[in-house]
Amino acid sequence: MRLHHVLLVTMTTLLASTSALLSTGTTKPLKFGQISNQGRYLRHANISNKHVEERGKLNPLSFLSMFSPNVPIGVKLQWWQTLGKSNNYVKKKLGLYGLEGTELKTHKNYRQYENYVETALKNELWEKARRGYFTYKMWKNRD
């Protein structure tokens, strides 16, 4: 270490220690007698649900709902796909419910909705194939 580094560290230490000592002057003891609780309890009888997480009883779904507006749509779509949500549910959540024609197709979330429906169909077909469902039956019953 160079000399100016050593001096800087020494001066900083001295200044910090002297200011800490100056701030601790004499303190006056409190003149309260012994405080009794007079029948009061620490916990209030009507506990609100605002601070539930402090008690360790946080519902995970309510915790996720606090971050819901900040979660990207792609993550939400994957989550809904995993949960097996219906196309109408996703359409409603993406703000496409009630839209028709060009209004529906020009909406900013329409492309993502189309991808969701296509992926849901693929997943359904793969699940049927894993169960031994015949391909001919899949396409015949589709209509």
Image (cartoon, rainbow, N blue to C red):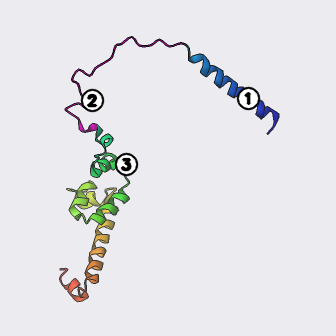
Query: What residue is drawn where x is 28% and y is 46%?
Result: 57
Mark-to-mark CA distance, 1 and 2: 48 Å
Q: Residues within 10 Å of mark 3 (few under 14, many from 20)?
A: few
- Say if the magenta span includes residue 29: yes
Query: Which residue in the protein does label 3 denote?
Result: 70
Task: Please tell me whether residue 128 is drawn above or below residue 97 in the rendered image.
Answer: below
Location of residue 110 in the rendering, given as x and y in whole percent from the top left corner: 31, 60
Mark-to-mark CA distance, 3 and 2: 37 Å
Nearest-to-viewer mark from 3 and 2: 2
Residue segment shown in magenta:
26-50
Q: Residue furthest right?
A: 3
Q: Amino acid at mark 1?
A: Thr
Location of residue 121 in the rendering, given as x and y in whole percent from the top left corner: 27, 73
Mark-to-mark CA distance, 3 and 1: 48 Å
Mark with earlier residue (3, 2):
2
Query: Which residue in the protein does label 2 denote?
Result: 42
The numbered mark at residue 10 is 1
Asked where in the image residue 78 lies, by quadrant, the reply is bottom left
Nearest-to-viewer mark from 1 and 2: 2
Asked where in the image residue 133 lies, by quadrant, the reply is bottom left
Q: Residues within 10 Å of mark 2 (few under 14, many from 20)?
A: few
Asked where in the image residue 7 lies, by quadrant, the reply is top right
Dot 1 falls on a residue whose secondary structure is: helix
Task: Please tell me whether residue 103 is drawn above or below residue 132 in the rendered image.
Answer: above
Q: Amino acid at mark 3?
A: Asn
Left or right side of 7 for 100: left
